[in-house]
Image (cartoon, rainbow, N blue to C red):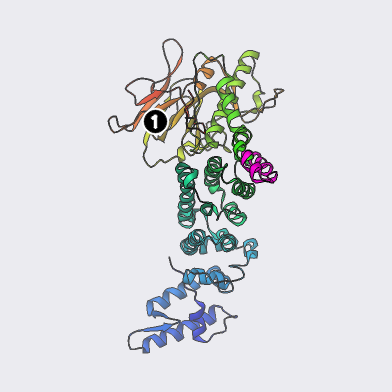
């Protein structure tokens, strides 16, 4: 869509632009139509735009909407916004638009009016600003995204998302090439203004911010011996990034280490000695939060009937997977406590009916499973033929998803071949829990049993390949003859396989832990 202000046309007619009303609009329309009727080619040119009789009629029909006329006037009074809409360019205006418009009682209508016109040019300029590394200018431009409605977000931010994924992939490539081929100028763009630019982007960019920080942290581990001062500068910038709490903790720890290492280096010999020793320190302290959590996950549940190896590849986004693993650990510990004490660990009047499909568990950490649309995936349908309520968890490379599955209900969702599926069965869903336990408790089922624990230990993965392709298919949770809960996908021909390994963990040396 292309926006054209009506004010140059109205000004051409000679009417007073400060006194636009039905009478003056009627006068302006007559003037233009008469001029067109006397024109040889049946059109007139105003401000470089050729207009026919039909163009004039359509224009004045739209101006009969008094609110639209108000919106056109607001755009005209904000030359930066008008230039962006009409010319798809932005000169060095002091500000794009007066943000006081957002507090006007007609602000929502104005956003709905201007957003379809603004989305494409604003997205183009944001992407150009980002690739040209003009982050201070970008901070000013981002303010205009306040006028973009959610329905137009993809048009505005789609290219920018690709740009950020590109630099994240580039950081990963630098890491894979190793310190020998790394040059400091490759990270010169990462500074305070770059971080603030990322921070000002909408909440939907949270995953991209986390992924960027993760790859940059991984790179600093690789280059720390040769570029300790650069690493310190990078962590100073990263410390202001709006990212997950887990990554913030790693950034804080690593920054302290690099400050100590670079601050105490007063001679070349001392620099070399400390540089050689700093790697072990940074690895031990900087990544303590990540590896300590994995250690807990692998060792705290030593009563399990089988060994479960939780593995993760550090070059992949880690915080979402760690979050899911930690959540599973919390639920297992809570369930054991509930079963041991033999009572419902919450009052019944706090229980809710989970039949409302608009709800899903852990909304702050999980997305709605129904919203998952992988590029290469298959639709599966799971019917709950048991008497249990079930939380369905799906963990992917980039996000965690969840949904409720009530008794007798069928749930259809998409799943890719490398995704992980888990179930949490129980009854009486609780939104919160007040407990004397020292650990932080989660939303949970107030009524659980040994089946709950058994299924929290089970992980399924679709086994799809070129030789054994997966198709859309249906499965069920059912009670067998032994009164045990079963998942019908747990057989050799279903396309599912129960797996023991969750994520693959690499050490710095590249050796695999078994």
Q: Quadrant of residue 460?
A: top left
Nearer to me, 354 or 158 = 158
Q: Residue at x 43, y 32 (%)?
A: 419
Q: Is residue 22 visible?
A: yes
Nearer to me, 214 or 353 = 214
Q: Residue at x 52, y 83 (%)?
A: 11
Secondary structure beneath label 1: strand
Report x, y in % for residue 110: 56, 63
Report x, y in % for residue 366: 54, 36
Nearer to me, 301 or 64 = 301
Eyeballing the image, is 332 above or below 145? above
Eyeballing the image, is 174 above or below 145? above
Eyeballing the image, is 128 above or below 458? below
Q: Which residue is mark 1?
A: 381
Would residue 412 be counted in the magenta stretch? Answer: no
- Residue found farthest to the right: 436
Give the dominant element type of the magenta stretch: helix, strand or loop: helix
Left or right side of 512 for 196? right
Task: Point out the stretch of residues depicted in magenta.
Answer: 249-273
Would residue 258 be counted in the magenta stretch? Answer: yes
Eyeballing the image, is 345 above or below 375? above
């Amino acid at each position: 869509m292309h926006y054209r202000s009506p004010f140059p046309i109205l000004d051409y007619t000679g009417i007073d632009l400060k006194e636009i009303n039905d009478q003056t609009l009627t006068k302006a329309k007559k003037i233009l139509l008469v001029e067109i009727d006397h024109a040889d080619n049946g059109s007139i040119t105003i401000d470089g735009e050729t207009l026919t009789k039909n163009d004039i009629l359509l224009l004045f029909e739209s101006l009969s909407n008094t609110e639209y006329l108000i919106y056109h006037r607001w755009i005209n009074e904000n030359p930066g916004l008008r230039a962006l809409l009409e010319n798809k360019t932005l000169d060095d205006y002091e500000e794009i638009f007066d943000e006081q418009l957002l507090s006007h009682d007609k602000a929502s209508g104005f956003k709905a009016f201007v957003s379809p016109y603004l989305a494409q040019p604003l997205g183009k300029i944001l992407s150009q600003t980002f690739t040209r590394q003009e982050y201070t200018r970008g901070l000013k431009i981002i303010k205009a995204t306040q006028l973009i409605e959610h329905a137009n977000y993809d048009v505005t931010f789609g290219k920018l998302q690709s740009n950020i994924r590109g630099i994240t992939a580039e950081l990963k490539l630098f890491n894979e090439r190793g310190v020998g081929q790394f040059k400091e100028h490759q990270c010169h763009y990462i500074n305070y203004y770059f971080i603030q630019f990322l921070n000002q982007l909408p909440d939907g960019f949270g995953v991209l911010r986390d992924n960027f920080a993760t790859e940059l942290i991984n790179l600093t581990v690789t280059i720390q011996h040769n570029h300790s001062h650069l690493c310190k500068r990078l962590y100073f910038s990263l410390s202001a990034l709006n990212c997950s709490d887990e990554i913030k903790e790693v950034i804080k720890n690593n920054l302290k280490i690099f400050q100590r290492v670079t601050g105490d280096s007063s001679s070349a010999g001392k620099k070399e000695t400390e540089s050689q020793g700093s790697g072990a320190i940074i690895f031990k302290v900087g990544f303590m939060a990540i590896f300590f959590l994995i250690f807990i996950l692998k060792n705290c549940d030593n009563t399990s009937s089988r060994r479960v190896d939780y593995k993760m590849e550090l070059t992949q986004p880690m915080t979402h997977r760690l979050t899911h693993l930690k959540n599973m650990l919390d639920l297992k510990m809570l369930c054991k406590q509930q079963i041991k004490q033999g009572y419902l660990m919450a009052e019944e009047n706090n229980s809710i009916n989970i039949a409302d499909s608009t709800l899903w568990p852990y909304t702050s950490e999980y997305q709605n499973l129904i919203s998952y649309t992988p590029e290469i995936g298959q639709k599966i349908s799971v019917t709950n033929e048991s008497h249990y309520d079930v939380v369905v968890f799906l963990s992917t490379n980039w996000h965690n998803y969840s949904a409720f599955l009530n008794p007798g209900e069928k749930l259809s969702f998409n799943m890719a071949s490398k995704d992980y599926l888990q179930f949490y069965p129980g009854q009486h869903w609780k939104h919160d829990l007040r407990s004397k336990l020292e650990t932080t408790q989660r939303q949970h089922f107030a009524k659980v049993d040994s089946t709950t624990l058994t299924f929290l230990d089970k992980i399924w993965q679709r086994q799809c390949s070129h030789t054994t392709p997966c198709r859309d298919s249906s499965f069920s949770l059912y009670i067998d003859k032994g009164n045990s809960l079963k998942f019908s996908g747990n057989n050799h021909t279903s396309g599912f396989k129960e797996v023991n390994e969750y994520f693959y963990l690499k050490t710095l040396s590249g050796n695999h832990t078994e």
